[in-house]
Image: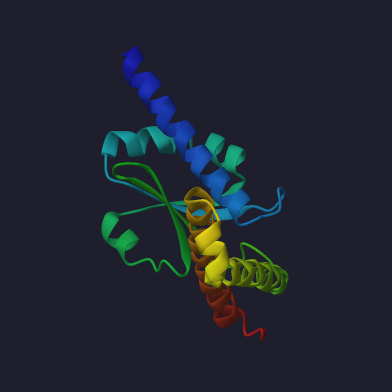
Amino acid sequence: KDAAVCESFAVFQEAVRSVRNIRAEQQVPVNKKISALFMIDDEEQKQRILSEEKALQFLCKIDELTIVERQAAQELSSEEHIEAVVTDGFLIYIPLAGLVDAEQEISRLTRQATKIEKDLATLESRLGSASFVEKAPKQVVDETTAKRDDLAQQLSMVKGRLSVLVEGSNVSV
């Protein structure tokens, strides 16, 4: 029985951690309440989570917690929801609508994209220089290449998020 209680509490902790991570990544103001959709396959686990619904709402600043079935969850758009996997068979979806001030977020993401593009151009220029590639130690060239690849991936993510926000808010960049 103790092992089941410990496992149940660990899942509860992971759910709280997942929602808080999403809030932090999306820079949601601390005092802003959000909506959340939980998809839980295991009926027993679903009942345990529901029994702690008030605690979850308090700890995660959730004003509306909805339990959805797997089929309904599969129909949710990844462009309109952020998905977090708590455990196998337990997913959390946070709707993006109303999560952040669209104009502020668009402005922030535009600045971030500009900075990444500038840094990326610097690294690509360095890697495009034959003298750098020939004279620099292999480790430095590899690190620079890895940094460039990482920045390219970051830029892609920022631009993707930016396009979703621009489309959804009718704000021009």
Question: Image point 39% across, 20% down: which residue?
Answer: 6
Q: In this rendered view, identify the residue nearer to me: 128 or 154.
A: 128
7 versus 146 height, above or below: above
Quadrant for the C terminus in the image: bottom right
Q: Exactly how many numbered labels are in the figure?
A: 0
Quadrant for the N terminus in the image: top left
Question: Image point 52% across, 38% down: which residue?
Answer: 16
Question: Image point 48% across, 62% down: which residue?
Answer: 149
Residue 60 is at least partly visible in this image: yes
Residue 95 is at least partly visible in this image: no
Residue 125, horizontal then vertical, whole percent = 59, 72
Residue 82, horizontal then vertical, whole percent = 47, 59
21 versus 59 height, above or below: below
130 versus 94 height, above or below: below
Residue 86, horizontal then vertical, whole percent = 40, 42
Task: Please tell me in which quadrant of the rendered image residue 163 appears.
Answer: bottom right
Horizontal side of residue 86 vs 160, given as left or right: left
Residue 117, horizontal then vertical, whole percent = 62, 72
Looking at the picture, the colour scheme in use is: rainbow
Horizontal side of residue 88 vs 154, given as left or right: left
Q: In this rendered view, identify the residue nearer to me: 31 or 140.
A: 140
Outermost residue, top side: 2
Question: Image point 50% across, 62% down: which residue?
Answer: 134
